[in-house]
Amino acid sequence: MKNRFTFLIIFLAIALALFAQSPAAEFAASADLRSDRCAVLIVDLNNGKVVDSHNENAPLLPASVTKAVTIASTVEKSGVKFRYHTKVYACGPIKDGILEGNLLVEGGGDPSLGANVEPKGTDIISEICEVLRKRKVSAIGGRIIVDSSIFTEPATPPSWSKGDLSTYYGTGCHGFNYQRNASGKKAVYNPQASFVRQLTSALAAKGITVADGDYDEDTDRGKPILDHLSPPIDDIMRSCMKRSDNLYAEAFLRTLALLSGKPGDTKAGAEIEMDTWKYKGADMAGVWIVDGSGLSRQNRLTARFLADVLAKMAYNVDFVSFFPLAGMEGTLASFLKGTELEGYIAMKTGSMNGVQCYAGYLLDDNYAPTHVVVIMINDFPGVRANVRKRAEKMLLDTFRR
């Protein structure tokens, strides 16, 4: 009898301990996860206090939540109305309808040029045809040349897996990008050549031939005959966050480098990004960033660092609006759908083999952020769908409305 009573007491003590676990602790203890390979941090923005946490200082693979950091870093430098310029030059005189020289297209790093997703800018090929028609050009004596030198090579970070490089999501980022450098599910390695072919065909349809004559490429450019503007960068960033576009994120990181007076390459952008957040007082312990999109498996972020970045950016209503709304938009369209948190959680997702991460905000009825939410899961042994359900349950348990 005494042994039974003792067992009952122990059982009740264990049950009460389990019942008393915080949602984050219960989440981390799930059989679908490895407790040491997941992290949670939820912070109240009103007072800076931690609502719940687990393993928040562990450096983990972030996948695409890296894009939130890239965009935060870039928009702080660029502002929301920055636009990319793609300039076109007639490198030679126009005599009797013939351009005696090359037609030069100078890339400005615009990742959205010719894109088939929103925001869709104006059609640069139609614009070139029209400007040449107005100048009464019937033939280009030289060649169509594309200058991509604003961004340095290689177009893809060395840390990316070779298996990703042939895919649409692993395509390179060039100084001149066109149609998202992809054809269906495949990467287009030379978007400049693809653009030249399409422009040549469009010019021919307008009665303008390209003779491919031999003219000096270094001919004085003079003033551009066309300055094509991208949509505002905030619209491109919003599209990137909702669709998780790797090309766009890589372009932003290189743009950050250029705007900081450095070469337009990935390495310079990543170094500037880490220096930026160190200067702003974010906890950099364990943080290592090598690309803009999160496709590299060498990136390491902590929940603490992500929470610091998001808290420092919470004032920026444009930045907060970039995050997809749970149950409604983009990569978060099915997450928390039909629950009381639908439309009240705005987060960037990050998914790759063995990785599921979330980072963003809890919003009030006016879409203003009230809490920072970071969930990072690496090397989970369970099924991804179950991991997502665990994350949903934790958020619902934490933010009962």
Image (cartoon, rainbow, N blue to C red):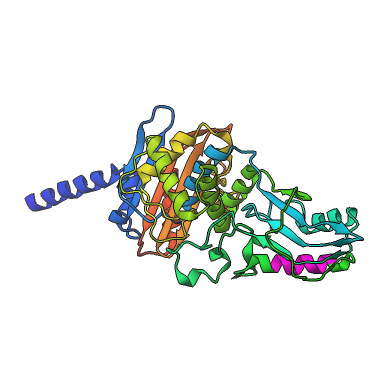
Q: Could you tell me residue 355's position as x and y percent?
A: 41, 60
Q: Is residue 198 magenta?
A: yes
**Point 49% across, 42% down: residue:** 73
307 vs 206: above or below? above
Q: What is the quadrant of residue 144 in the picture?
A: bottom right
Stretch of the chain drawn in magenta: 194-203
181 vs 21: above or below? below
Task: Pick whichever, 299 or 202, lies toward us.
Answer: 202
Q: Could you tell me residue 203's position as x and y percent?
A: 84, 65
Q: Could you tell me residue 151's position as x and y percent?
A: 56, 55
Q: Is residue 93 left or right of residue 258?
A: right
What secondary structure do most residues of the magenta stretch adopt?
Answer: helix
Q: Is residue 173 left or right of residue 389?
A: right
- The answer, for residue 114, to whether it is visible in the render is no
Q: Residue furthest top?
A: 47
**Point 73% across, 51% down: residue:** 121
Task: Pick whichever, 166 or 78, lies toward us.
Answer: 78
**Point 81% across, 54% down: residue:** 127
- The answer, for residue 17, to whether it is visible in the render is yes
Q: Could you tell me residue 23's position as x and y percent?
A: 35, 44
The number of numbered badges drawn on the structure is 0
Q: Is residue 2 left or right of residue 138?
A: left
313 vs 127: above or below? above
Q: What is the quadrant of residue 91 in the picture?
A: bottom right
Q: Is residue 80 magenta?
A: no
**Point 42% across, 55% down: residue:** 290
Task: Pick whichever, 50 or 176, lies toward us.
Answer: 176
